Amino acid sequence: MKKIKLTTWILLAMVLGILVGYICNANAPSAAAAKQIAGYFSIVTDVFLRLIKMIIAPLVFGTLVSGIAGMGNSSSIGRIGIRALGWFVTASLISLALGMLFADVLQIGHALNLPLPEQGAASPLNTGGFNLKDFVTHVFPSSIADAMAKNEILQILVFSLFFGFGLASLKGETAKTLIAAIDGLVHVMLKVTDYVMRFAPVGVFAAIAAVITVQGFGVLATYAKLLGGFYAGLATLWAVLIGFGYLFLGGAVFTLLKLLKEPIMLAFSTASSEAAYPKTMEQLEKFGVDNKITAFVLPLGYSFNLDGSMMYQAFAALFVAQVYNIDMSLAQQITMLLVLMVSSKGMAGVPRGSLVVVAAILPMFHLPEAGILLIIGIDQFLDMGRTATNVVGNGLATAVVAKWEGGLSAPRIAAPDSAPPAPALQARA
């Protein structure tokens, strides 16, 4: 099932869910009866959520280990990598902070005012037992099997880092065999993720029908506010990123943006960074970026510098907390942002990877995973904006690193379109 076809099915499922939910809401004799009817829809949503949780552990392990094992170790690559990662971390923190700011200021989720799902009712946000000591010690796994069984995302990340660097240090046929096996695991899990996402229309139908059954048509205004608030946040993020780009590139940053217009529109219309990747490389060469720098920094950015996706993750996680009237302190929100920043690395090639990351960290903060299904129905429209933002962020990052490395020449606007791009990296927000 191709992406555009899946998107069409999701939109149809959302419309059908609204209609069925309205009929159930109009014919329910009481509020208690409406909740009981919505409970039957939750059977389907629970199945879909279990499928999502099923793929998290192998996806995180495979993608992160594969990325680390494939990195070079020469001094020049190390220097460029450190500079690029410095930019990536800074941009990620800014993106997450803006997502948190807009979610806290707009408070869009509170309009839904949903009760906690039954399976989460006994575990509200534990504000008293959360402390730095417990958090730090909990990060390190005592058993990777137990961490994967419980989807302890940070523990899986720690093990994956050790495993990846250990694998990268090996030489010979053993290393090649293991790396090939991990790469194979990644491809298999991407295919499994695609299969799971094919069930998304059914999950969306059930989730939307359940909400409309209980809340009525008034809930639809919340979706309009969610889209408007998110795009306002993206516009602010663009302004900040372009401002930082201007500090290093001067007026040439506007030439760069003009060159990137086509890949940005391609990414927005397809909601796929993969589609825009070759054209982005071509336009960066026209801007004057050395091909060697582009070939290293841009793929690295597609794994570690998804600014639009980072902002979405913070926005979506706090939206879920607001939907169920769960108050999070500033310290807890900041901790969540740091966990999101670490958890999202290496997930670039995963279809709907941002949703998978949010679904993975919600249980860590005792937030109901069911909240994800309230977003997935309009996720295509959110995906379009965050994917276009990813292209802007990575284009600016590559150009700035080239400037630092002395690998930026005068723009070659008339450069031929046949410049050979590096192999396309599969990436989707």
Image: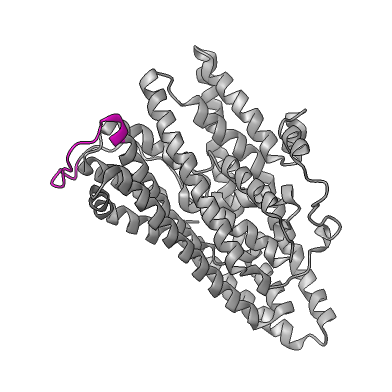
Name the chief secondary structure element in magenta. Answer: loop
The outermost residue toward the top is 172
In the rendered image, residue 36, in percent from the top left (x then y), is placed at 82, 75
Residue depicted at 65% across the width and 48% down the height: 336
Residue depicted at 74% across the width and 39% down the height: 132
Compared with 15, 345 (above or below) is above
In the rendered image, residue 142, in percent from the top left (x then y), is placed at 77, 28
- Specify the color scheme: one colour
Compared with 408, 245 (above or below) is below
Residue depicted at 45% across the width and 35% down the height: 86
Work out whether residue 253 or residue 13 is closer to the camera in this orientation and state it: 253
Work out whether residue 382 or residue 254 is closer to the camera in this orientation and state it: 254
Residue 414 shown in magenta = yes
Q: Is residue 185 visible?
A: no
In the rendered image, residue 352, in percent from the top left (x then y), is placed at 54, 52
Magenta residues, start to end: 402-418
Q: Is residue 183 visible?
A: yes
Query: In the shown orientation, is residue 278 left or right of residue 369?
Result: left
Residue 280 shown in magenta = no
**Residue 292 quadrant:** top left
In the rendered image, residue 363, in percent from the top left (x then y), is placed at 73, 50
Residue depicted at 52% across the width and 56% down the height: 98
**Residue 368 quadrant:** bottom right
